[in-house]
Amino acid sequence: MSQPQTIAVEFKRVMKSFGTKRVLNDVSFHIDQGQALCLLGRSGTGKSVTLKLIMALMRPDSGEVWVDQDNVVGMGEKRLSLVRKKLGYLFQDAALFDSLTLYENLALPLARLTKKSKDEIDDEVHRVLTDVGLGADGAKYPSALSGGMKKRAGLARALVLEPKILLADEPSSGLDRITASEIDELLMRRKTEHRTALIIVTHDVHGARRLADRVGVLDKGNLVAFGSVDEVSQSENEVARKLITE
Amino acid sequence: MTLHTRSTLVMFGATAMIPAVQAVSFFVEIGPLVAGLLLAGRVGSGIGAVLANMRASEQIDAIESLSIDSFKFLVVPRVLACVIALPFLTLFMDFAGLLGGFLSEELSSHIAPTLYINRAFDYLQWANFIAPTLKTAVFGFIIGSISSYFGYTTDKGAQGVGEAATNSVVLSSLLIIVADVLLIKWIFFLFPETAI
């Protein structure tokens, strides 16, 4: 029996500008819980801004951003903190805290936001690190990790609080194809085993084809195509067709 | 400072006053001010650069995304650390200065340590010592908050790291000097007997 669909993230007529440059122009879309959305588009078209608006690290100029039935636009810090607990964010360069070891990077949110004991935190961190293939690297500092390891560590930190929605900003950029496909596998497992909603900004069309239930194409701030991979590949928009069929 | 004042005091036949002048100078003004300026240079630039680097590399966004208040997590402890540490560093600076003064005097006039200490503290009252030392907590607050402000609010990527470090040192140092003048006037108002 299929599970009922609930909306994980929804944009309603969102606009965002930096100075005179409009990076998102009247963008609306939604994805359901357990689905994966891949956002494609040329550089500087507002893909990463979309993720930051979902995480409320930026505020839109107008429009609404709904995360699991809460409009995060204009929300106070206290309520925002509760909403953010439902979200995980894999940053483009992982954004690991460079003064902390890998173990401490993951233990920090658990120690501050949960009531878990030291032993429980140890077990949880070890479990998540093992899941991403870094079980033996907990004592290392981020500066001692390779690019692929940093991405996996960033993913581990994004997952350590068991988010319902995972945002990933170019999870495979700068990685060789094998490592990129390992990251894709981890994301796919998250989606299928935990029903986590994924919103992935990527330039990797092959990865997008493997992962995505929905593909959105942003061009000059406009969402020029949105739908399944097949639908977007037959889109009337030339940029969308080119991006998905390259 | 010791070498400069010595020749002047000797000229006026006030050789016996050298330890007292050195002690008062260090405890009242030189120790607090130099410790503040040193901390602004060393720690202020560090705080500015570290926070700016964290901003540029999205580490501050990462903290926010983990539902942790980045201001409380990064800024408040740094400001508190500066406020608490600077008075202690000032004490260290005061006594290091006094030790330097003694060594200089020992080399020049072979003064006995006990005599130097007795003469050094002859004119020093508690008010000369407590208030100037505690005023460095204000310097610490200036260093912590100004440096954190420049680092935390930068939006210029890697270029912002250098700018934050430089601006932190320059503005902290200037404000320490301004605050020092105002605090001296305030200390004189509260403890008129210290206006020597």
Image (cartoon, coloured by chain):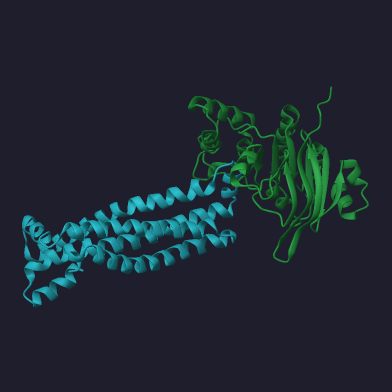
Chain colours: A green, B cyan
Tell me how many marks there are. 0
Whether residue A77 is visible, yes or no, is: yes
Image quadrant holding the N terminus of chain A, namely: top right
The one of B135 and B91 positioned closer to us in this rendering: B135
Q: Residue at x 75, y 46 (%)?
A: A202
- Quarter location, residue A31: top right
Whether residue A179 is visible, yes or no, is: no
The one of A200 and B66 positioned closer to us in this rendering: B66
Q: Could you tell me residue A141's position as x and y percent?
A: 52, 41
- Quarter location, residue B62: top right
Q: Could you tell me residue A180's position as x and y percent?
A: 72, 40
Q: Residue at x 45, y 55 (%)?
A: B47
- Quarter location, residue B33: bottom left
Q: Could you tell me residue A53's position as x and y percent?
A: 70, 50
Q: Could you tell me residue A210's position as x and y percent?
A: 81, 37
Q: Residue at x 59, y 31 (%)?
A: A129
Q: Is residue A187 above or below residue B28?
A: above
Left or right of residue B73: residue A229: right
Q: Is residue A52 above or below residue A116?
A: below
Left or right of residue A238: residue B167: left
Furthest residue toward bottom:
B11
